[in-house]
Amino acid sequence: MQLAIVGLAQAGKTTVFNAVTRGHARTGSFGHGVEPYIGTVKVPDERLDRLAALFKPKKTTHADITYLDFPGGFSREGAPAQLLNALTRADALVAVVRAFEDTSVMHPLGSIDPARDVDALSMELAFADAAFLEKRLQRLDIEVRSLRAGEREAGEREMALLRRLKDQLENEVPLRAQSVTADERRMLSSYQFLTDKPLLIVVNLGEADLPRAREIEEEFRAAHGGPGSDVAALCGKLEAELAELTPEEAAEFAKDLGITEPGLDRMIRMSYALTGLISFFTVGPDECRAWTIRAGTPAQQAAGKIHTDLERGFIRAEVVRWDELLADGSLAEARKRGRLRQEGKQYVVQDGDVMHVLFNV
């Protein structure tokens, strides 16, 4: 799962990237490259940590996601075509907007206004989608007119759908917020619209605003949140400094600042959730592990994430919720109390399930 970090120049997006990945990518605006910095991070999950404390395995493996940071970025003139094209390959977007004051670093639009910057970024993404829709409609029109009358139905339905999407997009409704049927979603499956991708808005605060971080976050969520989008407020500079410390030092430093949870942990978890991903767990003395699946995945298909043999030879799964397993203290006790359920191929795996798969070799 890849998430692309975008933003206007001097928003601090590379600082946020360095903080979240513990990387050392060069900061500052220095061109419009299309080769991104890449960093893979573990998804914080207290549930897995507590299960590992119970089972004391040799190895604990968290789920992970990958962040991409493209050098340069959006400017007063918009976004380079190469960058927009590269963003189509990401699974979701993380838009960093600047809310911190720094007289030594000028904002490209002349003033600090994160709400305006969210609108500017959204407009650029919408322009890109609208331009693509217009070109696709033009090509479809030529193709459909060249067909016999009885062969035009599929193309005409696609054209009607694309026109509807374009009209709403031009009325400032991103594709992720537009209603489409399951059949229409399948029709769009080959497209990679930018405004259809999940969007996490990261408000990059100054340290003075940290006490109001949650309040600012809620204000932005009310104004800019919606289907497939969410907001996180954090101080990228401070989070980058914390990332350079040992976990113990970072925890002590955060405690002194009154920070109960690192902003980056919340950002990572929100990124994960926005993409429609959930985790199920396998536990044992060798390894406790989080496995990533999409919400709605049936048990047999989820078993394939562990190993293809498990999916092919799937018989049934033994399933218990993570918190019930912790309360019972062991799989044997969960079985004794009737909490370790037997589930078949079509059982829809839930976020937080602990699963043991029985299969034929």
Image (spheres, rainbow, N blue to C red):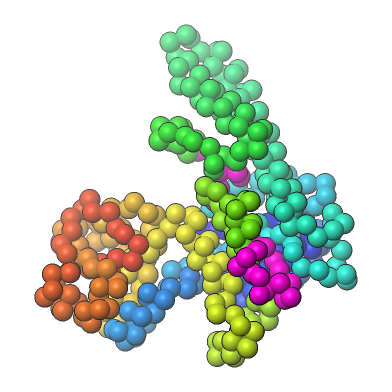
342 with respect to 107 (left or right): left
The C terminus - image quarter: bottom left
- Height in image: 66 above or below 22? above
Image position, residue 139 (x, y; %)? 61, 23
The structure residue drawn at horizontal position 74% and vertical position 75%, both measured from the top left corner, is: 208
Image position, residue 215 (x, y; %)? 62, 65
167 with respect to 80 (left or right): left
Please identify the quarter of the rendering in which residue 233 is found.
Answer: bottom right
Residue at the left extreme, as displayed: 336
Image position, residue 100 (x, y; %)? 76, 68
Which residues fall within the magenta stretch? Answer: 190-216
The structure residue drawn at horizontal position 71% and vertical position 48%, both measured from the top left corner, is: 119
Please identify the quarter of the rendering in which residue 176 is found.
Answer: top right
Q: Does the magenta portion include 198?
A: yes
Q: Nearer the viewer, residue 282 or 119?
A: 119
Image position, residue 14 (x, y; %)? 70, 67
Q: Nearer the viewer, residue 38 or 255?
A: 255
Q: Is residue 274 visible?
A: yes
Q: Nearer the viewer, residue 171 or 303?
A: 171
- Height in image: 324 above or below 166? below
- Height in image: 110 above or below 249? above
